[in-house]
Amino acid sequence: MKLLEQHSVHGAPALAPDALPSLLAQLPGWQPAGGAIAREFVFRDYHETIAFVNAVAWLAEGENHHPDLTVGYRRCTVAYTTHSAGNALSMNDVICAAKVDALYAQRAGA
């Protein structure tokens, strides 16, 4: 099943360390970052950045899985980890990363 077709689940277990490389291969631009996965997204202006941040917030509420966001004038870094899995990575992180990528692609096409 494709990542975009899946949904976050409460209590998702930590991923096995050997699972991450193949999952990250499906998420261009996402990198391991201190126990999380993160990607920086770039925009034309502040308004676009904040619109993206708001879209990510709605997605996070719907999936009940919330990223850390670092927001700048023309950029936003999104970082996922699963606190309930001991601050490790879970399938929730890669599922939501794929959905954030889809949001970004949709906004870039708008």
Image (cartoon, rainbow, N blue to C red):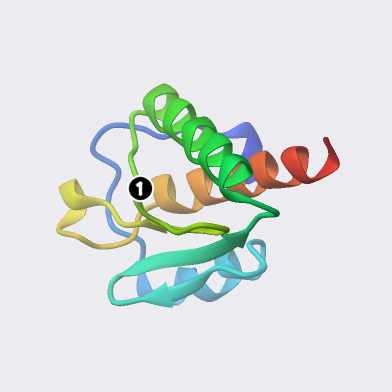
Let me know if residue 19 appears in the view: yes
Position in image of residue 42 (x %, y %):
63, 61
Q: Is residue 31 above or below residue 84?
A: below
Determine the residue positioned at 64% across, 49% down. Answer: 101
The three-letter code of the residue at mark 1 reads Pro
Q: Quadrant of residue 110?
A: top right
Residue extending farthest right: 109
Which residue has dot 1 on it?
67
Towards the viewer: 84 or 79: 79
Let me know if residue 1 appears in the view: no
Position in image of residue 37 (x %, y %):
42, 66
Q: Secondary structure at mark 1?
A: loop
Q: Is residue 106 above or below residue 21?
A: above
Determine the residue positioned at 63% across, 62% down. Answer: 27
Towards the viewer: 11 or 46: 46
Q: Quadrant of residue 26?
A: bottom right
Left or right of 42 in this view: 109: right
Q: Quadrant of the N terminus?
A: top right
Q: Is residue 31 above or below residue 90?
A: below
Left or right of 83 in this view: 21: right
Determine the residue positioned at 76% across, 38% down. Answer: 106
Determine the residue positioned at 27% across, 51% down. Answer: 82
Position in image of residue 22 (x %, y %):
59, 70
